[in-house]
Amino acid sequence: MNTNSAIRLLMLLAICFFLTLDVAANQPAKIKVSDLRDKIAAAWVGQMIGNIYGLPHEGKYINAPGPENWPYGYTKNLDKLIKYNGAFSDDDTDVEYMYLLQMMKFGPEPTYAQLRDAWMYHIRDRLWLANRAALGLMHFGYTPPFTGSKKLNPHWYQIDPQLINEIWAVTAPGMVKYAASKSEWAARITSDDWGVEPTIFYGAMYSAAFFEKDIRKLINVGINALPPNGRFTATAKDMIALHARYPSDWKASWKEMAQKYYIDEPDMTKTIWNANLNGACAILAMLYGNGDFQRTLDLSCAMGFDADNQAATVAGLLGVIYGMKGLPEKLYLPVESWKTPFNNHYINITRYDLPDAQISDMIDQTLKATIDLIILKGGKKTGTQDNATLQINTEAGYSAPPEFYLGPLPVMEVGQPVDYPFYTEANKSYHWSMISGTLPQGMNFLNGRLTGTPVVAGNFSVSLQLSNGKEKITRTFNLLVRTKNIAQTADTLLANVRDLNQKVLDSCWYTFGRSMYAKSVNVINDGITTGAGSVFYSLATKSKIPKVDYYGYGWKTPQRVSMLAFHTGCLEEFGGWFTSLNVQYMNDSGKWVPVEKISIVPPLPATDIVFFQPHFVEYVISFEPVSTKAIRIIGDAKVQDHWNKFTNQVSSFTSITELCVYQ
């Protein structure tokens, strides 16, 4: 056997060793309440340690891993700990704290609608990527899981859900199937497809960690919870193989990992915040850290990319494994005068009207939610107050609360077949029925699905009922049937900027792959509203100037028009949206004049704040019918200052994927 064959065999044996380990069969089903509280405490404190410790390394190591001058220490964040006299919030802990408060308010299984309300109230700045996209869609009127959908949230593959969902597994000790499913459910608030897989992985690991200390066995638990053919499943196995190949050389593993999952990552998903990439970093940190808290923490930072995320998540996991006694005291008592972890203070500096908290209260609230959930799922509490024990139903599963999910309604045109599900996977199995209203002629509704071919244009209203056998809910949906889209029959496409200025785009801090952007405005009537090559940016100049943008069509013969549909594309942190929007048509004298009685549904956001701007949505613009040879939308384009200095010298611009025209 040659050397390469021997190495391949060793790697295969390592993977097989991981995948044949059986943790679940040996898991105890009981835990003392005092031990549970200790592990919950260490989960919170561990995440705070990892987040604050990792912040200085965020985005710092991309072309090479971090240096081995360990321990890194708190470095520049020690002054902030002193300033706030305790731990301070960041996006690795604040959303989880917000979720905890919703569990205190609504019980251990809040709905998407309840979490959405919390997002829209408490989160008003300091979020990016998939989280920001999800919030913009929430303000538009959509609910999860549409807020994380690949078709609507162009950042669906980013790291965001890994940061904010450990709480669902911390409150489900030993209920691995439940924790994995609920973590996936929550991850879909912001993400989709393989972008949610690392969150499932962590959910299973956190839940199992209440009864298992071996980090290698826990990694196996996480893998077993993943889709067998999932992308992150393959990535996790790849990290195990790399560790087997280079058992004493973490930098060699890092190099191959970074090459495969960052350098060679497809253009559309290549970012330093990619969920799969950062999940791979965390697995390597856990393998090479081998259960040692300080070494694993430093490795999590040294792996680079979005380092504070993996540092927080992995440190919280080790907290669950070892409890408070397993956390280095110097890391939670970095200030000499402090006597309790982080001086028992959690100071909110990131979220609107989220109260400061005593860490001990956060721990007790989490303990209560955990006990409530254990009992709800078939477990029980026995014993006296000082020696109480919880018996856990480790086979418990998660079923999403019954609710209607609000997203794009079907785009129906006369004569075009329709097949539209009102459900997603989470509520598909519930009983669906139509209890009132009139369907468009030619359409049928059965088991939550709308099918058929509409015959007549118009507005139709139907009321649907959803039941899980215990409770029933109803909701009215307004359906629009349109005439045929005549945009593609136009002889002329009208726009003030016809070609993307690629050099200007390259000077910006843009967050999507180059292949997302179309080179020409001609894509706005090709029938494609999302994906590679679908988005046109009206970026024109390098100088920062305001401008008015317009898009429209012309015909050789007059057309009757009463409705337009404007589809936005992806947006940047610094602009890309209309701050005003009007419709003009060319009259018989060849002059542009406004249409009358214009209505935009839904209305444009009432604010220019980026967190209210939605990606990939449709605005339906209705008005008094006009007969014209040309029609256009027109409005003020937005650009604003951003922390990236180059972006401050970019002209205002708008983003568009499609403009449809109806008679």
Image: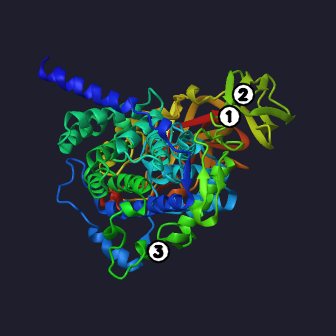
Inspect the image, locate mark 1, and give the three-letter code of the amino acid beneath it: Tyr
x%, y% of residue 392? 60, 47
431 relative to 580, above or below:
above
Task: Give the residue drawn at x 43%, y 59%.
Answer: 323
- Residue 129: x and y in percent read 44, 50
Q: Earlier in the sequence, mark 1 or mark 2?
A: 1
Q: Residue furthest left?
A: 2
Which residue is disc 1 drawn over? Answer: 423
Residue closer to the observer: 189 or 224: 224
Task: State yes or no: discs 1 and 2 in contact (Cβ < 8 Å).
Answer: yes
Work out which quarter of the rendered image holds the C terminus and state it.
top right
Q: Secondary structure at mark 1?
A: loop
Q: Circle 2 — which element? A: strand
Q: Which residue is mark 2?
A: 449
Disc number placed over residue 344 in the picture, else none = 3
Q: Is residue 107 visible?
A: yes
Q: Amino acid at mark 3?
A: Asn
In this rendering, which labeled residue sits more in front, label 3 or label 2? 3
Separation of marks 1 and 2 at Cα, in angstroms:
8 Å
| Residue found at the very far top of the displayed protein | 1
